[in-house]
Amino acid sequence: MLKERPDDKNTETCAANTFDQGCKYDDPWACTMSALHLALGKGVAKNRENALKALQKSCKYGPEDEACMAGNRMKEALLGELKAKTQSAVPQGSSSR
């Protein structure tokens, strides 16, 4: 569906809901894809924290599984974004002493 209509909002919402349901049944690839939709805000509200929660189920079959490898790359990127956001929220000139 997403390949045929990548910019269709109804398709994005349907895909996001489908991946979310699959993740609730502990399917690693569904969790990775659900996290992607959450991270990008495609078909659902953008929510990096929930994306990270979904990624906790991506490595069910071990670190060599494609879902796990993709999930770990996404997790690193999301954590980097959150860290950068946190650092930019600290007023310049302040210290943590």
Image (cartoon, rainbow, N blue to C red):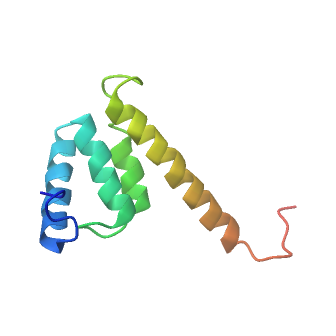
Image x and y of residue 34, in percent? 27, 52
Image x and y of residue 14, in percent? 12, 62
Residue drawn at point x = 32 percent, y = 37 percent: 57
Q: Is residue 88 left or right of residue 34?
A: right
Q: Is 97 drawn above or below residue 89 in the view shown? A: above
Quarter of image, res 70: top left
Residue drawn at point x = 34 percent, y = 26 percent: 65
Give the position of the C terminus as an image quadrant.
bottom right
Quarter of image, res 23: top left
Give the position of the N terminus as an image quadrant.
bottom left
Image x and y of residue 8, in percent? 17, 72
Residue drawn at point x = 20 percent, y = 58 percent: 16
Q: Is 46 drawn above or below residue 73 in the view shown? A: below
Q: Is residue 75 left or right of residue 56?
A: right
Quarter of image, res 84: bottom right
Q: Residue furthest front?
A: 4
Residue drawn at point x = 39 percent, y = 60 percent: 39
Image x and y of residue 20, in percent? 20, 52
**How many badges with numbers are in the image?**
0
Q: Is residue 33 left or right of residue 76?
A: left
Q: Is 72 drawn above or below residue 3 in the view shown? A: above
Q: Nearer the viewer, residue 6 or 30?
A: 6
